[in-house]
Image (tube, rainbow, N blue to C red):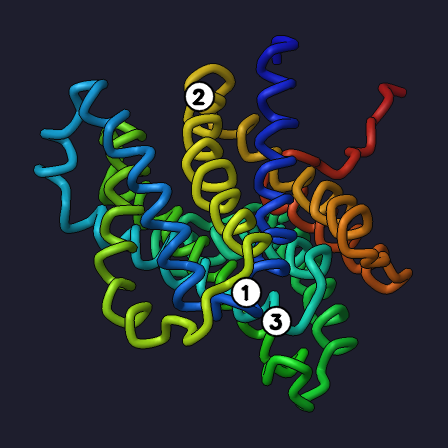
Amino acid sequence: MRPRDLAELLLLAALWGGSFLAMRVAAPDFGPLALVFVRVAGASAVLLPLLRRRGEWPALRTHWRPIALVGLTNSALPFLCFTVAALAINAGLSSIFNATTPLWAALVGWVWLRDRPGRDRLLGLAIGFAGVVWLAMGKASLKPGEHGVSPALAVAACIAAAMLYGFSANFAKRQLTGVPPMALAAGSQLSATAVLALPAAWAWPPQAPPAASWWAAALLAVACTALAYVLYFRLIAHTGPASASSVTFLIPAFAIGWGWMFLGERLSPEMLAGCAVILLGTALATGLQRRPRARHRPV
């Protein structure tokens, strides 16, 4: 990577790590449905003019059906799941479960696309999912918390979101290869907005959220979604998808740091160990890390 690419990678990780902090701040006042609607509607308002300026609007019209499905499975539903989780567990833990997305993508690709992983990747899947089970068992309480969401439900929501991301990655690979990335980004946010408009109107908070929650929602929409998509697709174009996907390993560090800095959240030893196990499994499952091979010397 060039220094500029590395700087953009770190900025992207900081933005996506910050999304978990913003959800923690705004979710109690907005509620999950209203907050996610504000997020995707705001991102659409930023991305659609960029799409028209680039002259890629025809691509959105041509491929609107599969793009609409990506908007549902890669934005509306996973954003909703993580926002529900933000009502019960801290930003760092949510981001660690988010880091399992490549594991689910590999598993879905194996089952659906018959993309059979090798031994190292199978080992990575086993290690990564063992880390997920370990962390999930530590948060298995079914007792609802302050906002009516139990830690167990929050963990299940995070895992469901990562599974949806994994499905979307494989679906886009199969159905949307060659579609301009900006058309996919803007179109997916637009379709998510359309899907969530009526449910968000029904669930809109009776009292106006405070200014801090509105600022957090604006951060989610403009920086953590619209700007982050632009950075992500720039990185794919400049460094390739494998290098761009390494952002997954940096997001938990930023999410934990933001949570500690602004909300006083702390990293427990169990979270640290579980994160290390999940990231090791992810590195093996995605091919970013390989086991050392024994070298045979000639006699």
Image depth: mark 2 or mark 1 in front: 1
Q: CA distance from mark 3 to mark 1?
A: 7 Å
Count neighbours of disc 1 (C-alpha within 10 A) and say few if under 14, some if 14 to 19, many if 20 or more.
many
Q: Tell whether label 1 touches label 3 (CB within 8 Å).
A: yes
Closer-to-camera residue (193/136):
193
Q: Position of residue 149 (x, y in %)?
A: 60, 81
Q: Quadrant of the C terminus?
A: top right
Image coordinates of residue 41 in percent, x first then y, are 32, 49
Residue 101 tag number = none
Three-letter amino acid code of the residue under disc 2: Arg
Residue position for label 1: 27
Task: Kindly identify the residue that appears in the image at 41 percent across and 59 percent down.
Answer: 36
**For the N terminus, which image quadrant?**
top right
Helix, strand or loop at label 2? It is helix
In which quadrant of the rendered view does residue 4 lie? Answer: top right
> Which residue has dot 3 on it?
87
Q: Report, in whole angstroms, how far the alpha carbon at label 3 lies from the one at label 2.
A: 33 Å
Q: Amino acid at mark 1?
A: Ala
